[in-house]
Image (cartoon, coloured by chain):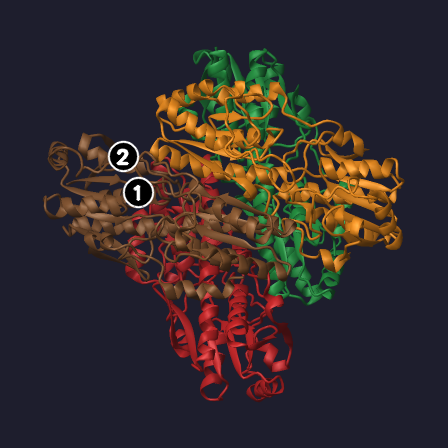
Chain colours: A orange, B green, C brown, D red
C-alpha cells in the first residue's frame, strides 16, 4: 500500500518528527511505501510530489520546518479541486492520505474523508494550541520555551533601567502562548484575546510593580484587544492570505503606558522566532507519537479520524471534532494567573 | 493562619516555583503568613526555620534548587520524631504544612496527616517521573531536555568517528527519562530498568546501524540491567544515605559492546546536570500551578491530599495514592519505541 | 581605601560580572572597601548609593543587567555637576572611581579624571562593540549568540514557506552584530550602517537564492540605510533621551522586497532580547578579567586609564582613546562576507 | 584547479563551517573544484574520497562534526605512506591540499609540505585550545559554553544539598577549558594540568566555602594531577589509539574530598558532550574566517602555511609554528583566577 503525506498551514517545530515516525513505522512494520505531497493541499491538487522513504527522513527529527513544504492552498476553493485530488491519488496509486495541519488543512480532510471517499487520517498542528480534542499540539511547547527565554532576558534589562517591557507573542484567537510563557517567565501582566483588557487596570498593575522597585514585564498575545475598542491598529493592511494584520497591539500598548504612567516602555515582538528551529524534547516526543499512531490508524483502516493527546495517551477522535470549535483559555484558568499581576 | 513549607529528597528544577506560588497566593488571596522549614523534615524535627514571605520569594521562579534546602531525614525513624515535629509546629504556631517531595517525603506526610493529626498537603516531586497519581512531575521535563540536548551533541561526534556512544541517564527504577530523551534525541537503542536487556540484541541493533553508515547512540537508564545478571557493577559501595550505587551500567555496557562488536564505544554519564539549573517553561508552569492548588487545598482544609496533574487539569488525590505504587513504563509504550531501534 | 563603582548607559550582559570581580579582588587582595553609585553618573551627582561588599556580589556572575542600575545622566550637563560629584566623593570618603560604560559614560570619566582631578579608571562597555582601543567588549558575544540562535530558528520557517525573512539586529552606527550573527547564522544578505545598500542588489541576491530552491534570510543592522535616501522612516519620533528612533529599516525593507520581487517577506526585530539575560561564557570571562584588571589599575594609581582586550591580553590605555573614534566595520572585512551573499 | 580537503583528529564544532567556507569562496571566487578525502589522512592514503561542491556544503554551517569523517591515521607511519598519498593526489588531479586538524594532522602536513613537495595549507583545530600560534581555535568556545552551562546547573544542586560537586572537563595537557569555564561558571576551585594541585589546599578552599553557607564547585581538567603522585588512576587501560586513559581524576578527587572533609562529594564527567553539537556563534565566525583565508592562501600559492587568529585578524604562519610547542596556561593567568578560590 502507498500512503500520501502532506503538511499544511503555518510551520511548526515537530512536523518533520511526525513525518519521520510515519515513514519509519509504516515501512518497517507494515511494509507500506510513501509519497510526499509538496506544499500542503497544493501537492495533490497539482500532482507535485516529493520522494519519501527511510533515507529521506534520516536526520530530520531535530529539524524545524517541514521537508514537504507547506502552503495554505484550499482545494475546496479551487476549480474542480476534489476531482483533481482524486485523480492525483489514483494516478500515483496512493490509497490513503495523512494530512498534518491545523483548522483549515484538517477541515479539508474532514470534507474529503466524509463526502468524497478520500481515506484520510489527520494529525493536529497549531502553534497556538487552539485546536479542540487534544490536550496539546506539538510546536506549542517550543514556542512557549522561546518566549519564556526571551522574557527571562528582558527582565534584566527592565530592572537595570526601571522600564516597562512589553512582549508581544503569538496567539490571534487564543492566549495559550501568552498565558504559559507569561506564567513561566514571571510576567507582571498577561493579556489574552479571550478577555478584553482595561488599559487603566494594566497601568495600575505596572505602577504597583514599580512601587516595590521592580520593573514590569507585560506579555500580550497578538490578538489581545483593549476594552471599548480604543486601540488604533498600526497597520490595517492585509497580508497575502487576505488576513488583516493584527500585529501592533504591543507597540500601541507601550505608547499608552508611556503616556499614562510617565514611565519609559519598550516593545519586543517575538514573531517568527517562536515557530522555527529545533523542537523541544516534549514536542519531538509528542510529534513522534502522533506519527506512530497516525500510521497505525491507517493500518487499522480507521479513516476520518485524527490522533490526539489525552493526558499521556494518544487517542483517536473524529477529525471533525478538532475543527468544530476553537479551544480558548478558560476564564477560570486565566483568573488563576491573576495572583501574579502587579 | 501560619503555614509551614518544606522540600525533601533530591532537588528538582521547579521547587522554588512551587514555593513562590504558594507564598504569593497564600499571602495575597488568603492573608496567610508562612514559615519555611530548612532541609526537609529535618526542619520541623529540629525547629530549624527560614523566613518566608513575598520578598523572600522574589526572583526565585527561574532558579533551580530550593531556597529551603533539602535532606532525606526521616522523622519517623528519629527518636520521638512525631512528638518533636508537633512541638515545633505548636511553638511556631504553624497550623498547616505543605510538604513538597517524593516517595519518602510524602510517605511521612501521609503518616503524619493520617494517624497523628498533623494537617498536611502534599506536592509530588520526582525527577524520575515515577510517582503514581500524576501524569507528570515538575523537573522531569527539564531533565529530559538536558538529556536530549546532550544526545543531540553526541550524534555529531559519533558520526564523525563512527563510534558507539552510550549515554547513561537518570532513572533507578523507572525508565521515563531514558525513554523520553531517547525518543526525542533519536537514539538507536533505549534501555530501561523495567525490562532486562539482552547484550547480544543490543549489539545486533548497533551493527545494523553501522551498516547504513550511521553511528549508534545508546541511551541507558542508570537502573537498567542485563538479562541473566551478567553485569559486574563497577562500584558496590554505598552512598551516605545507605543506597547502593548503581552507576556503572553505561561504562559496563560500552566495554561489552567494544569487545563483542569490535567498534569503539564511549560512555557519557549525565549525572547531576540533569537535575540542576533553571526549569523548563513546562516545569515552571506545572510547578507554579501545583503551588497555587496546594495552598488552595490548605484553604479548603482538604488535608491528607496531594495535588496532581491529569491532562491539563490540576486535581487533588489522597497523598497515599502517590506513594502506593511506583509508576513504571508500560511495556506497550516501550514497545512503541522499538521501531526506532537499530 | 574606599572605591566607588558605577555603571552607565544601556545595560549589557556582563556588567555584574565586572562588579563582582572588582569587589572580590579589591576586598581580598587589597583590603579596599567599596561603595556602589546608583544609576550611572546620577549616583555621585545626587549622592545615591548602594552598599557593595562581597555578600552583595554573591551569585551575580551569571545574571544580566546591573545591580547598580544605570542611566544616561550626564553630570557635565547638570548645573554644578562636577562640584556636586566631588562633594559626594568627599562626603563618602571615596578616593577612586571605576566607571563602567560606553562612549558617554567614559567621556565623562575622561573629563573628570583629566581636568578635574577625580581619580577614575574606566571599563569599556558597548553591546555594539564599537568602542576603539579594545578588540571586544563584553555583552557583544551574548548579543551575537542571541541573534544567531534567532536566525537559526528563522531558517526553517523561511524554507517551509519559501519566504524572505528579514531580521533587524542592533547596531546604530556599527554593523558588528549584523556581520557576526549574519555570518554565523548563514544569512544570505547582511546590511550594515557603514555602507549604504542598494535595494535592487539586495533583491537580486534574494532572487538568486530562490533559484536554488532555498529561502533567503536578510540580516540588517538597525542603523543600515539604503542608497539615495529612499527610505521613509516609519517613525520619526524621538525617545526620552532625545534620540531619533531609527527602528524601522527591517519593516521598510521587507515591504520593498515584497513589492519588487513578488515574494512574501516578513520582519523580525530582535530588540532588547539581544541585550538582556545571562552572559555567554566568553562575556563572563572577559567581564571578569576586565574587573580584575580595573581594580589592579586603581591599586597601581594608574588613573585616567581604561582596561582593554588585545588578543588574549588585558592591557591599559588612556580612557580618551576609547572615545576618540567609533570602531566601525572595515570595508575589507565586510567584503570578505560577500561571498555568502545571494 | 582541484583542491583536496581533509579533517583529522578528534572532532570539533566548526569543522563543517571551515569546509563550507573553503568550498564557497574557492568555487565562486577562484573557480576551483574540490575533492573531499574521507577520515583524515586515511583518505588520501587509501584514495577514499567524498564529492565536495556547493550543494554538498549547503546547510552544514550549524552542524557539529565533519561531513568528511575523521581518524587519527598517520600516513608517515604507514608503509610507503608518502608515495601512496602522492599517487592519490596525482590520480585525482588534486594540486593542493587543505588539512584541518591538530598537532598530529598538521605535523603530517608540515612534513609533506616541507620535504615531500605536497602543497599543503593548514587550518588549526583543537578543542583544548592548546595549539601555539593562534589566539583561539574553533570548537573551544563551544566546549567552554557547554561546560559553563553544566556548571550553572550544578550550582543549584550543590546549594540545595550542601554538597561538593566536582566537574571533570576536557584538557589532557592544557587547562584552558577548565580555566575559562571555571571562571565563567563561578567555580570555587579550578585545577589544571599545568600545575600539580595539593589536595589539602583544595579541601581548605572547600571548607572555607561551606563556612559562608555556600556549596563548592570544583572544576578539574582531565589531565590535572595531585602533588606527590598520590593519585591512583581508576583505569590504566589503553584506548584503541594506544593512549592511556587519564579519566578518573574527578572521581578520585571526590572520594578524597569526602574522606578528608566529611562532606558529600559527587562527580560529573562532561566527556564528549563538550565536543559535539552545533558550534557557538563565535566558533562559526572563526571557522568560517579560517576557511576563507585558507583558500586564499592556496590561491596565493602560500603553501606550508597555516591560518591563525591574532586579535581580530586572521594571519598566516608556518604550519610548523603551530606544532612546535604546546600552548599551556601561563602561571600568571592561572594566578589571576586564584582570587575566586575558596
On residue C20, the disc is: 1
Q: Nearer the viewer, residue B40 or D58?
A: D58
Is residue A212 something one can see in this rendering?
Answer: no
Q: Nearer the viewer, residue C13 or C144?
A: C144
Q: Is residue D103 above or below residue B137?
A: below
- Identify residue for label 2: C39
The image shows residue A245 at horizontal and vertical percentages of 57, 35
The image quadrant where one finds the C terminus of chain A is: top left
Of callouts 2 and 1, the N-terminal one: 1
The residue under the point 15% across, 46% down is C111
Q: CA distance from mark 2 to mark 1?
A: 17 Å
The image shows residue C262 at horizontal and vertical percentages of 60, 51
The image shows residue A92 at horizontal and vertical percentages of 86, 55
C1 on left or right of B337: left
C51 on left or right of B246: left
Q: Is residue D124 above or below residue C157?
A: below
Q: Nearer the viewer, residue B91 or C107?
A: C107
At label 1, counting other C-alpha atoms closer than 10 Å, the crowd grade (few under 14, some 14-19, many 20 or more) is: many
Amino acid at each position: 500500500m502507498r500512503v500520501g503525506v502532506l503538511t499544511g498551514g503555518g510551520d511548526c517545530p515537530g512536523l518533520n518528527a511526525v513525518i519521520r515516525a510515519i515513514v519509519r513505522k509504516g515501512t518497517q512494520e507494515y511494509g507500506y511505501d510513501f509519497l510526499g505531497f509538496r506544499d500542503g493541499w497544493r501537492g495533490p491538487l497539482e500532482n507535485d510530489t516529493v520522494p519519501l522513504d527511510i533515507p529521506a527522513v534520516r536526520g530530520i527529527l531535530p529539524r524545524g520546518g517541514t521537508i514537504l513544504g507547506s502552503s495554505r492552498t484550499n482545494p475546496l476553493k479551487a476549480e474542480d479541486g476534489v476531482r483533481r485530488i482524486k485523480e492525483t491519488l489514483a494516478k500515483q496509486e496512493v490509497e490513503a492520505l495523512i494530512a498534518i495541519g491545523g483548522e483549515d488543512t484538517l477541515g479539508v480532510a474532514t470534507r474529503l474523508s466524509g463526502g468524497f471517499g478520500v481515506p484520510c487520517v489527520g494529525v493536529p498542528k497549531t502553534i497556538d494550541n487552539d485546536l479542540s480534542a487534544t490536550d496539546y499540539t506539538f510546536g506549542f511547547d517550543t514556542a512557549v520555551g522561546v518566549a519564556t527565554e526571551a522574557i527571562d532576558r528582558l527582565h534584566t534589562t527592565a530592572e537595570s533601567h526601571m522600564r516597562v517591557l512589553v512582549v508581544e507573542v503569538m496567539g490571534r484567537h487564543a492566549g495559550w502562548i501568552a498565558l504559559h510563557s507569561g506564567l513561566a517567565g514571571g510576567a507582571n501582566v498577561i493579556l489574552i484575546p479571550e478577555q478584553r483588557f482595561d488599559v487603566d487596570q494594566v497601568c495600575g498593575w505596572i505602577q504597583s510593580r514599580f512601587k516595590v522597585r521592580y520593573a514590569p514585564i507585560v506579555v500580550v498575545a497578538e490578538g489581545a484587544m483593549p476594552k471599548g475598542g480604543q486601540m488604533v491598529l498600526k497597520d490595517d493592511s492585509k497580508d497575502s492570505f487576505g488576513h488583516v494584520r493584527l500585529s501592533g497591539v504591543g507597540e500601541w500598548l507601550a505608547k499608552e503606558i508611556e503616556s499614562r504612567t510617565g514611565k519609559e516602555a519598550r516593545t519586543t515582538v517575538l514573531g517568527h522566532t517562536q515557530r522555527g528551529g529545533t523542537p523541544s524534547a516534549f514536542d519531538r516526543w509528542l510529534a513522534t507519537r502522533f506519527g506512530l499512531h497516525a500510521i497505525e490508524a491507517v493500518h487499522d483502516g480507521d479513516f476520518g479520524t485524527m490522533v490526539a493527546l489525552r493526558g499521556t495517551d494518544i487517542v483517536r477522535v473524529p477529525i471533525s471534532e478538532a475543527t468544530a470549535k476553537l479551544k480558548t483559555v478558560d476564564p477560570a484558568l486565566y483568573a488563576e494567573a491573576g495572583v501574579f499581576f502587579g
